[in-house]
Amino acid sequence: MPLKGATYSYCVWAVLLLLASCASSPITQRSLPVRGQVTIGYDSIRSFPNGSEYAQFIIYNETDSTFWFSAEGKYLHDGHLTTHPLYSMKVEYDDRWKDDSPFWCLTGVERYAVEPGEHLYFTTSMPTKKSRAFKAGIYFSLTKDPRGQTREIWSSEVRLR
């Protein structure tokens, strides 16, 4: 079914926003005008009630500045402040790393802050059983405007076998 009216306009805007954010040049940790660092740590592999698995990570803001990222919400889950950010994923198959990032529609996506000293949990899908390892990444910026300079921060690799 073709998109109509406001839905079409919103999707066109979302695609343009995504292209603009991808075109921005990432900044390195050294060039960030802050003290400390933002890191992503692996927490655990968990299961939904239906038995399917997901990976849980933690974003740590150990800087003196607020960082911003795009996500589909920020909420309490199992007693933890949790988010579902627009994450990237790299997966290792047969000694080669491959981009296995999900496609994001951007409907309902907003910018969220990680304050200095704060940490947030987030979840990712699990790679296929054939993979050896995976890691998750998130784009951060120093401003709420997603068109500003960004930096992608990656977790360490999570070994599966």
Image: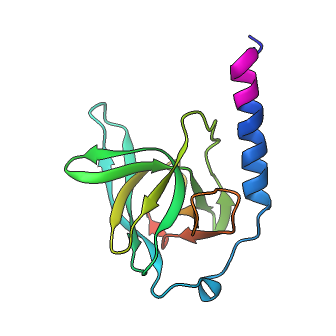
Q: Which residues are magenta?
A: 5-10
Magenta-drawn stretch contains 9: yes
Q: Left or right: where does residue 92 sit relative to residue 44?
A: right
**Residue 81 inside the magenta-drawn segment:** no
- For the point 42% across and 64% down, the residue is 114
Please, which residue is most extreme toward the top here?
A: 1
Quadrant location, the C terminus:
bottom left
Image side of residue 50 versus residue 143, left or right: left
At a point 39% along the width and 61% down the height, the residue shown is: 57
Image spot of residue 90 (x, y percent): 60, 61
Q: The N terminus is located in which quarter?
A: top right
Residue 51 percent location from the top left of the image: 31, 36
Q: Quadrant of residue 2?
A: top right
The correct choice, above or below, for 100 with respect to 97 in the image is above
Judge whether 85 appears above or below 120 on screen: above
Q: Nearer the viewer, residue 116 or 43?
A: 116
The prevailing secondary structure element of the residues shown in magenta is helix
- Decide if residue 133 is in sight here: no
Picture coordinates of residue 9, whole percent (x, y)? 75, 26
Q: Position of residue 109 (x, y in %)?
A: 55, 41
Q: Quadrant of residue 36?
A: bottom left
Q: Is residue 29 visible?
A: yes
